[in-house]
Amino acid sequence: MNLTAEKMKQLIVYINDTSYKQFVDLVKSLSYVRKVEAFDEMTKVEVTNSIKTGLKEVKQFKKGQLKTTSTKDFLNELSGSAY
C-alpha cells in the first residue's frame, strides 16, 4: 500500500481516555482507513519538565560535563544508514 500515491485527508479527534482504546479499535477496523496514528498529548507539567531537562543538558554541555553526538552520527542514526 502506497500512502503517498492516493489523495488522503487527515482528521484530528480529541476523545476522553475512557473511550480512547475502543475508538481506535473501531477506526482501525474500517476498511477505508489506510493508516492510524495515535498520539498522546503531553501535559503542561510534562512539557515543562522536558524543557527544563533540555536546558540542564545544554548547560552541562557548555561546561564540558556532557558529550553529544556529532551531527553526522545523529543523521546516520536517524536514517539507519551510513553517509
Image (spheres, helix red, strand yellow):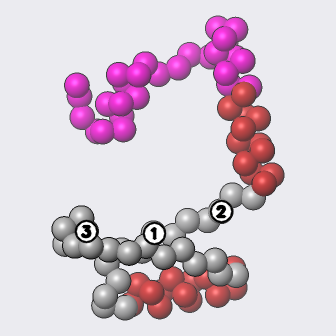
Q: Secondary structure at mark 1?
A: loop
Give the residue number, with chain letter if any, for mark 2. Answer: 41
Q: Magenta region: which residues?
A: 56-83
Q: Residue at x 75, y 58 (%)?
A: 43
Q: Amino acid at mark 2?
A: Glu
Closer to the eye: label 2 or 3: 3
Q: Is residue 47 magenta?
A: no
Residue 77 visible here: yes
Give the residue number, with chain letter if any, for mark 1. Answer: 37
Q: Is residue 64 above or below residue 41?
A: above
The quadrant in which residue 67 appears is top right
Foreground of the two, 78 or 13: 13
Badge 1 vs badge 2, beta-carbon distance below 8 Å = no
The x and y percentages for residue 74 are 40, 28
- First in sequence: mark 2 or mark 3? 3
Q: Rounded to the nearest whole Å, what is the CA distance between mark 1 and mark 2? A: 13 Å
The x and y percentages for residue 34 are 31, 78
